[in-house]
Every structure is written in structure tokens, then in C-alpha cells.
Amino acid sequence: MSQLSDLTVILLICQLLGDYQLCIPRNFRRRFGSVKAQLRHVAVHAVLLLYPFVLCIRLGAVPAGLWVFLFIIAAHFIQDLLIALLARKYQRRRLPIFCADQLIHVIVALVAGQLGPILLDQRLLTLKPFLLSREQLNWLLLIIMVTKPANVLHELALGRYAPLNAGKSLTREGAGALIGNLERLLSVIFLAIGQPAAIGLVCTAKSIARFKQIEEDKGFAEYYLIGTLYSILYAIVSYYLVMHS
């Protein structure tokens, strides 16, 4: 039995889309730089949250849906202001600030999606998305999680292990991120069909493509191994968190 309501999963999807997939690259790097940038960022989330609000309207739970909408928007804006202050004061603490920021976003979505129906209107528990089953919702959330958010976390957490000559690589910009996305997507597919051992094939293909560089550059070999293990671990944890929620 699912522990999370459909509303919670939808709110998590909206949160990740607004912070990653639909975030303009320049604004993504500098969204804490000014109040104007933060307002633009929150506006993106407001547009996304119109979707669950419309679902609440269909249920006839307009006041409850409006409270959820306003609660998340207000919490997001206030949180971004506080995170901006921390980011400017502790510029070398990017990773813990990022993790704290994302954890609070998840908590806000859980409070709105899980407690909202209890405190506001129990009809929110019956909220159903257009043409999507719960399994499809879970897959959408999982796909979003294992792509851009994983790349951002990788850059923040593991960027310091990158070899000094990484900038001289002849690979195209963004190729590594795309490979990571495909690696994690294939991993969760193999997990879903009950073939976790097949994940080893992905690792083998990557190793063959980079064999010469791994053999000649110890620093790159270590970075490559760390990144691969991170990617697989991220995919496995994400899969079980989402599919068993």
C-alpha cells in the first residue's frame, strides 16, 4: 500500500521540475542573487502548482486547494530568501546548504500533501491526476529525480575529485551529464524488470569507452570510479524510495 498520497507525489514532481528541468540555466546559477530572480523562480513554481490546484477544483475542494497552493508558494519564497542569505555568508558550504534547501522543500511537500487532507479536506486524499495512474506518477517522479537533480548533486559533492586536467578533455560539453542520465535511467529500468545484474553491462560499456584514459591517468580513473559508483547508488536508492513509497 502506498504511504504517500497522490497529491504529495504531484507536489514533489512540481518541486523538482521547477528547481531543475524548467529552471533557466543562468537563473539556476544565480537565482539567489536578487529578489527579482527569486520572484521569477517562484513564479515558475506557481505555474506548475496550478495543475494540482485545478485537480482540487475538480474535486470541489477549492478552499483546501488554495491553502495548499499559497502555503507552498509562501514557504518556497521565504525559504529562498533565507537560503540566499546563507549562500552569501557561507560561500564555501554549497553542498550542505544545497542539501538543507532540498530537504526543506521535501518536508514542505510532505506537510502539504500528507497533512493537508487531514487538516483541510479529506477529499484531497482522492485527488487523481489527468490520465495518469499512481504507477505512472511514480515513474515520472523517478525519471525526474535521476536526471538533472542527480547531475547537480554530483557536481557539488564530487566536483572536488575531478582531475586537474579535466578541462583539457576533448569530449563535448554536457556529454558526461547525458551519459550519467542514461546510465541511471537504464539502471532503474533494469531494477524494475528484475534484472539488477544487467547494470554491470552499463558499467562495462563505459569502461570500454574510457579504457585508455583510465589506464593512463590514475586521477581520472579514481574520479571515474567514484562517479560511476555514485550514479548507480543514486539510481538504486531513488528507485526504492519512489517505488516503495
Image (cartoon, rainbow, N blue to C red):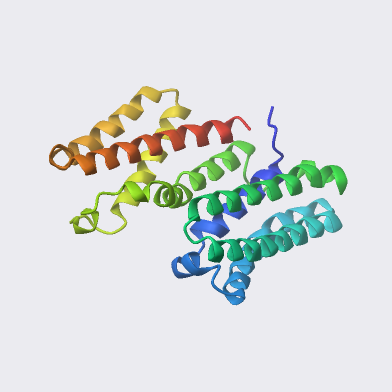
Q: Give the number of marks.
A: 0
Q: Relative to residue 209, is residue 147 drawn left or right?
A: right
Residue drawn at point x = 34 percent, y = 41 percent: 227
Q: Relative to residue 189, is residue 50 drawn left or right?
A: right
Q: As rendered, which of 241 and 10 lies closer to the eye?
A: 241
Spot occupied by residue 228 in the image (x, y as percentages of width and height): 33, 37
- Quadrant for residue 226, please give it: top left
Q: Quadrant of the N terminus?
A: top right
Q: Residue furthest bottom?
A: 36
Spot occupied by residue 109 in the image (x, y as percentages of width and height): 69, 49
Spot occupied by residue 186 in the image (x, y as percentages of width and height): 38, 36
- Quadrant for residue 196, please give it: top left
Q: As rendered, which of 126 and 64 lies closer to the eye?
A: 64
Residue 25 vs 198, above or below: the answer is below
Residue 166 vs 26, above or below: the answer is above
Residue 33 vs 245, above or below: the answer is below
Q: Quadrant of the C terminus?
A: top right
Instruction: Evaluate whether residue 213 shows in this view.
Output: yes
Instruction: Evaluate whether residue 130 shows in this view.
Output: no
Residue drawn at point x = 63 percent, y = 69 percent: 43
Residue 229 vs 122, above or below: the answer is above
Residue drawn at point x = 61 percent, y = 54 percent: 14
Spot occupied by residue 218 in the image (x, y as percentages of width and height): 19, 39
Q: As rendered, which of 115 and 141 lies closer to the eye?
A: 115
Residue drawn at point x = 51 percent, y = 45 percent: 145
